[in-house]
Amino acid sequence: MKTLIITLVVISSLLSARSALAHGGHGGHDEPPRVAPAALAEAQVRLRVAEEVARLVDVKKIPESWKEATFRTVERKPTPAGWEWLATLDNPKGKKNEQTLYVFLKPTGEFVAANFSGK
């Protein structure tokens, strides 16, 4: 009888420990798999940069003439964390040292920064 009680206690302990360890967050049946956002294609980057330039004009960070700017390049720039998009725009109507605008986006299109130095 003592052996039967010990066996039942051990089995009960194993079963309860297993269910205590079972929880969400492992990509099981109860939740969709987690997928990292995809990097944008160059055409999508151009659209996002145009949106950001318009926003910067609207909040008066850059002059209105930047709405007429043209793209020079869109490229991937290496960073310590991986890479980000760098779009270079030209505006001949800008001030002498502000005729080239550099816009940085994360690979997924989130705005990082914009400046006239490229750094």
Image (tube, rainbow, N blue to C red):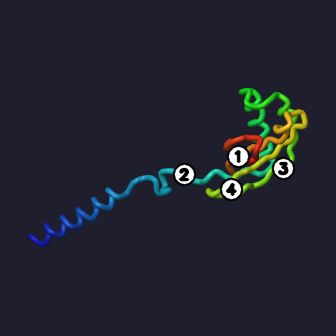
| Mark 3 residue crowding within 10 angstroms, few (<14) / some (14–19) / many (20+) | few
Q: Which mark is residue 83?
A: 4
Kind of residue indicated by mark 3:
Thr
Q: Nearer the viewer, residue 27 or 1?
A: 27
Sequence-wise first label, 3 or 1: 3
Q: Residue at x 70, y 58 (%)?
A: 78
Tell me the element at label 1. strand
Task: Find the distance from the CA under tag 4 to the CA under tag 1.
Answer: 9 Å
Task: Residue 101 in the image: state x and y as whole percent.
Answer: 80, 41
Q: Which mark is residue 105?
A: 1
Please name which of the two marks, 4 or 2, marks the residue nearer to the observer.
4
Kind of residue indicated by mark 4:
Trp
Q: Residue at x 79, y 50 (%)?
A: 42
Sequence-wise first label, 4 or 1: 4
Kind of residue indicated by mark 1:
Leu
Q: Which mark is residue 32?
A: 2
Tell me the element at label 4. strand
Q: Which residue is mark 3?
A: 73
| Residue 110 placement, left or right of 67 | left
Sequence-wise first label, 2 or 3: 2
Q: Which quarter of the rendering shows the N terminus?
A: bottom left
Sequence-wise first label, 2 or 1: 2
Tell me the element at label 2. loop
